Image (cartoon, rainbow, N blue to C red):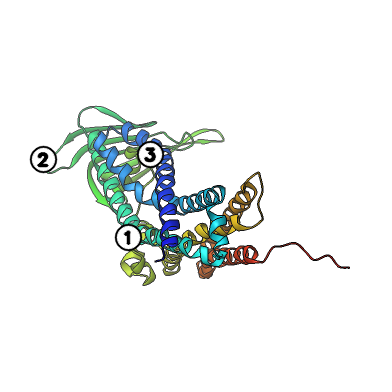
């Protein structure tokens, strides 16, 4: 690699490390605050909180890296222009197309990092996070399954167990669920079992009765239903969240492209949904070189100004926002119809066209116009 390419690439990598560290820290802390509250309210230790926040880090990094690449390129190009290094390079015969080569290498490097994250680390972290969430839901549930006393695992929920048999059966169970004032339910059962499924712990009530109290036109109406077996989801109620099954984002890209039947059965998704998720991952790394090239090519447009290149920085930011807007719009459209997955690659194509257009404008010869006589 020529020395000038190594110099520009070194400058960009240094700035990229700084911006990535700052943006990841800010974004991660913002996401971790709500996670801290949920886990600490459930009585989890600091080690569990640290583990969960660490598992969310790969996703945060994959989102932030393209923005950090854009910021590093725009700031680096602005500094090269401000210190007249860019002018010296252009005076030595290096045109915009030639100067764009190290920037493109830098963008591809960031894109490879994003690809490693979205295809490898992020699915692994999400799968581990799902498993740990299920384990914690069971642990929290076990804390409230104490015999001989009334428990209040959630607001509006009362639980009582007379005794626990030696084989783990819950004897004489009582649950009052008044979270919905329009439909208050009381469950009683002679026995109950705690079992685990894909969505977390579930109570299996045996030989019991459900009493529903609803408002009616002439007063409250009570309906009674007797059952031999009834399942009651306690994981969502005790752990403070909705019942959580496996998600397509927990699995590898290859399994999604092949529409693995085991993946579809675990998630309840269709083959088209799995392929849509896979193509979203394939398209995501393409935005990194686009962001880097936009930060560079836009700043080369226009001549010298004593006010610097802040106008070009504004146009570069607007261009990046436009590409990101198209990315979100394409994702929303494909979310409605998975057969439209080729739209996911459209923002990268349009972004590449913008970069080429800006480089072409920057490479046009600019000089005094001849005055017609």
Residue 324 visible to an observer of this rendering: no
Q: Give the class, few, some or many, for how many residues have Cα within 10 Å of label 1's Cα (few <14, many ≥20).
A: some
Foreground residue, 147 or 127? 127
| Mark sitting earlier along the chain (1/2) | 1
Report which residue position mark 3 lands on: 32
Report which residue position mark 1 lands on: 120
- Rendered image quadrant of residue 180: top left
Which residue extends farthest right? 373
At 83% from the left edge and 65% from the top edge, which residue is drawn?
371
Q: Residue 77: percent from the left, percent from the top? A: 53, 53
Badge 1 vs badge 2, beta-carbon distance below 8 Å: no
| Mark sitting earlier along the chain (3/1) | 3
Q: Secondary structure at mark 2?
A: loop
Report which residue position mark 2 lands on: 166
Q: Residue 327: percent from the left, percent from the top? A: 54, 59
Is residue 276 found left or right of 88 in the rendered image?
A: left
Q: Quarter of the image containing the N terminus?
A: bottom left
């Amino acid at each position: 690699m020529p020395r000038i390419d190594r110099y520009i690439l070194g400058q960009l990598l240094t700035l990229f490390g700084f911006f990535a560290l700052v943006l990841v820290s800010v974004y991660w802390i913002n996401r971790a605050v709500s996670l801290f509250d949920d886990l600490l309210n459930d009585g989890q230790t600091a080690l569990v909180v640290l583990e969960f926040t660490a598992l969310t880090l790969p996703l945060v990094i994959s989102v932030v890296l393209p923005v950090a690449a854009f910021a590093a390129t725009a700031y680096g190009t602005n500094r090269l222009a401000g210190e007249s290094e860019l002018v010296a390079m252009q005076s030595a015969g290096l045109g915009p197309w030639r100067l764009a080569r190290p920037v493109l290498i830098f963008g591809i490097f960031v894109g490879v990092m994003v690809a490693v994250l979205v295809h490898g680390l992020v699915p692994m972290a999400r799968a581990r996070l799902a498993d740990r969430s299920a384990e914690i839901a069971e642990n929290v549930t076990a804390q409230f399954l104490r015999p001989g006393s009334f428990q209040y695992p959630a607001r509006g929920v009362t639980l009582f167990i007379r005794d626990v048999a030696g084989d783990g059966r819950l004897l004489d169970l009582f649950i009052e669920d008044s979270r919905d004032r329009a439909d208050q339910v009381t469950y009683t059962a002679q026995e109950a079992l705690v079992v685990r499924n894909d969505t977390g712990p579930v109570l299996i009530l045996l030989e019991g009765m459900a009493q529903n109290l609803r408002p009616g036109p002439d007063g409250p109406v009570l309906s009674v239903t007797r059952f031999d077996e009834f399942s009651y989801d306690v994981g969502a109620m005790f752990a403070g969240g909705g019942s959580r099954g496996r998600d397509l984002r927990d699995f590898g890209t290859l399994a999604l492209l092949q529409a693995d039947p085991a993946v579809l059965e675990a998630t309840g998704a269709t083959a088209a949904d799995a392929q849509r998720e896979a193509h979203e991952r394939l398209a995501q790394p393409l935005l990194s070189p686009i962001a880097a090239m936009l930060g560079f090519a836009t700043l080369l447009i226009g001549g010298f100004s004593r006010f610097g290149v802040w106008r070009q920085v504004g146009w570069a930011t607007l261009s990046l926002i436009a590409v990101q807007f198209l990315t979100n719009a394409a994702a929303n459209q494909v979310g409605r119809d998975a057969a439209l997955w080729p739209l996911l690659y459209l923002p990268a194509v349009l972004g590449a066209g913008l970069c080429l257009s800006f480089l072409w404008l920057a490479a046009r010869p600019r000089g005094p116009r001849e005055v017609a006589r």
